[in-house]
Image (tube, helix red, strand yellow):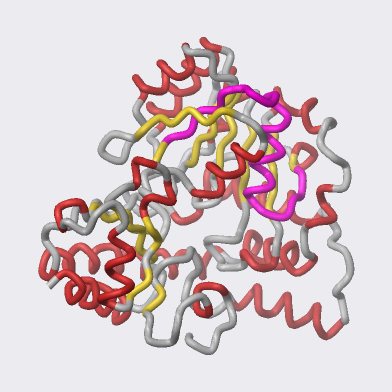
Amino acid sequence: MAARRSLKWREYPPDVLPMWLAETDTPLAPPIRAALAAALDRGDTGYAYHADLPGAFAEFAARRYGWRPDPARITLVSDVTQAITESIRLVTEPGDRVVLDTPAYPAFLSQLQALGRCVVENPMVDGRIHLTGLEGAFAAGARAYLMCNPHNPTGTVADIETLYAIAELAHRYGVRVVVDEVHGPLTYPGAVHVPFAMLDAEAADRSFVAVSASKAWNVAGLKAALLVAAPGAAADLHRLPPELWVSAGIFGVMAGVAAFSHGEPWLDELLAGLDENRKLLADELNRELPRIGYRPPDATYLAWLDCRALGLGDDPAAAFLERGRVALSPGPLYGPAGRGFVRLNLATSADRVREAVARMARAVN
């Protein structure tokens, strides 16, 4: 793994165990490898043909979730962050309030601020969306709600009752809903990912959903994602900059088509291994660091660890890096609700999970 040239493996010195950035340590899925190798053999490295990926995702969503979005309402973009940014730009104006559940993916916090929107934080309660807080934020004049489901960094999957409650609140207060669902394919047994746009609700009918193969199949660097407009939001798509698709990479499109069309058996094997790792982490923490709070995620390969009882301050990741030589994502990057927390990436070998906990324990003890 250390031979990889990605950011996860190059950011820190060789003696640091990287368990931070959301990349997997798995080999590339064979259908994706074959598609990219064939493209290289053809010298097929020009601009992406943007019509291939929407149909492949629509068929995948139909099989996986029982949801078949119309490919005509799906736009190719470079990544999920761009999809979210352009959606927020469509449904709000500078100065408008946008609600975000916190802790939140750091890029969402920074991008909303860069757009000139007012971020209204809705702190989660026990890792779940706080509906009372959400209603208060909506009633105070919010124009949009940026939801992450499955949630990064907590790994929570909102159940269908919660989603309908959100849709009812959004309709009541005239709030547009934009959803990051990039981690949807990484949902474990016992939880069910329900795409927000498939709900039978008016707010869902006017929503935008951002999706990609990037996280589940580890192809983020190839740059391709999709912005899905629900039927009532279709007219908004015409206001998008027409050149958005140019920023997507042809390898990203090819990888996404291969993943969504032929990558489900590989995905199921990946989930089985990740399921074992999320349980292993619980066992290792109970044995080595029982004061750390950890609820195994419903989805994603991300573990959100409550380290406040360790007395390491607002940024425990700094102590784990300095004393234990293990790199974790600092909780404060995810907003004030992340103080005293770290995010750990489970998408690696069982031995690295054990080694990460051992290093964290050395840093504390």
Q: Residue at x 40, y 38 (%)?
A: 102
Q: Looking at the image, which is closer to me, 56 or 142?
A: 142
Q: Residue at x 27, y 55 (%)?
A: 305
Q: Looking at the image, which is closer to me, 270 or 133?
A: 133
Magenta stretch holds residue 87? yes
Tell me if residue 39 comes above or below residue 210 in the rendering. below
Tell me if residue 173 comes above or below residue 334 in the rendering. above
Could you tell me residue 341's position as x and y percent?
30, 53
Q: Residue at x 46, y 56 (%)?
A: 186
Examine the image and state in which quarter residue 62 appears. Answer: top right
Q: Looking at the image, which is closer to me, 243 or 28?
A: 243
Tell me if residue 124 comes above or below residue 139 in the rendering. below
Which stretch is magenta?
75-101
Could you tell me residue 74's position as x and y percent?
74, 42
Q: Is residue 202 left or right of residue 102?
A: right
Quadrant where the C terminus sits is bottom left
Tell me if residue 349 comes above or below residue 341 in the rendering. below
Q: Is residue 356 left or right of residue 78?
A: left
Examine the image and state in which quarter residue 208 appears. Answer: top right
Examine the image and state in which quarter residue 50 appears. Answer: bottom right
Could you tell me residue 316's position as x and y percent?
28, 60
Q: Residue at x 80, y 56 (%)?
A: 247
Magenta stretch holds residue 335? no
Please state the total of marks drawn on the protein image.
Answer: 0
Q: Looking at the image, which is closer to me, 139 or 193?
A: 139
